[in-house]
Amino acid sequence: MTAALPTEFARIAQYFRPLAGPGALALSDDAAVFTPPPGRELVIAADAMVAGVHFLPDDPPDLVARKLLRTNLSDLAAMGAAPLGYLLTVSVPRGTDEAWFAGFSAGLAADQAEFGLHLLGGDTTSTQGPVSLSLTILGTVAPGTALRRNGAQAGDDIWVSGTIGDGALGLLAAKGALPDPDGFLSDRYHLPQPRLPLGLALIGIAHAAMDVSDGLVQDLSHICRASGLSAEIQAAEVPLSPAARVANRLELCLTGGDDYELLFAAPDSAAAAIRAASRATCIAVTRIGTFRHGPPHVRTIGLDGNELSLGAGGWSHL
């Protein structure tokens, strides 16, 4: 008679083994073994999400899984990297039902199919606290081509993809604190759109890049510090969705997190190539300002022509 698998291993076999790629060894060993594509450099990033901090405790598990994977894919997009695979750690309270695991794994399966990658391994544990998730993603780039934060140059234009502020407004909508009749804002919060095709297209065009996860102004300040430059953006040029314009919360749009759009620096001479990349990938881009010589600082010029005072300028994890 064959002994039944302990619950942890039974769940791994039922919900996570079907997600595993060849290098995962059917999740039956202590680690994955795989060979990176020849002539490529590895790009590795990790992010964590905790219930009540990064997602709402009652969010559907499939959407939680997809947001976790997509936020990490956004880090690859910002480096101009193509996805390869990921490692996953799941910590849930004892007694979490099978429906949660089924929904969570279904969400991962849907986005694995959409973005072309597989699970390589990870861990499952119990916790006395809220659901805690961590994902380490692997991607590849051609040697020496990864987009960095430290490459911006004085005179470079500042560009963003998509629209800004929808994620922060979407959190308010998901909490019922902001009208969202068609669900657009809530959807933008729950399901960010990693701009992988645009990131790949910006290789050799952009001087620096990162994704907007903690607020436009704060994340732009990271590029300023890394590149030793100041920046000036025009609030009137920051692209807002129709729903964000109706909400009329400009400061929140400039400082709120969860947009996962690309923020990048490029010379003025690259404008035509950037717009061509935008058309080719069907991802909108907008020029919003300029990098300049000066101490690392972001000046945000308001609609009245005066500099806005935005406090911390974004989300802090600690």
Image: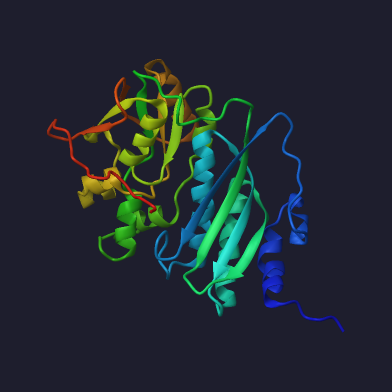
Q: Residue furthest right?
A: 1
Q: Is residue 133 above or below residue 214?
A: below
Measured from the top left, where is residue 35 in percent x and y? 76, 41
Q: Residue furthest top?
A: 269
Tell me, yes or no, if residue 285 can be seen here.
no
Q: Quadrant of residue 231?
A: top left
Q: Quadrant of residue 208?
A: top left
Side of 215 relative to 115 (left or right): left
Measured from the top left, where is residue 82 in percent x and y? 60, 38
Q: Nearer the viewer, residue 275 or 310?
A: 310
* Quadrant the N terminus occupies: bottom right
Q: Residue furthest bottom?
A: 1
**Residue at 48% from the left image edge and 22% from the top image edge:** 205
Q: Nearer the viewer, residue 261 or 227?
A: 227
Side of 304 relative to 137 (left or right): left
Tell me, yes or no, if residue 178 can be seen here.
yes
Measured from the top left, where is residue 288 in percent x and y? 30, 30
* Quadrant the C terminus occupies: bottom left
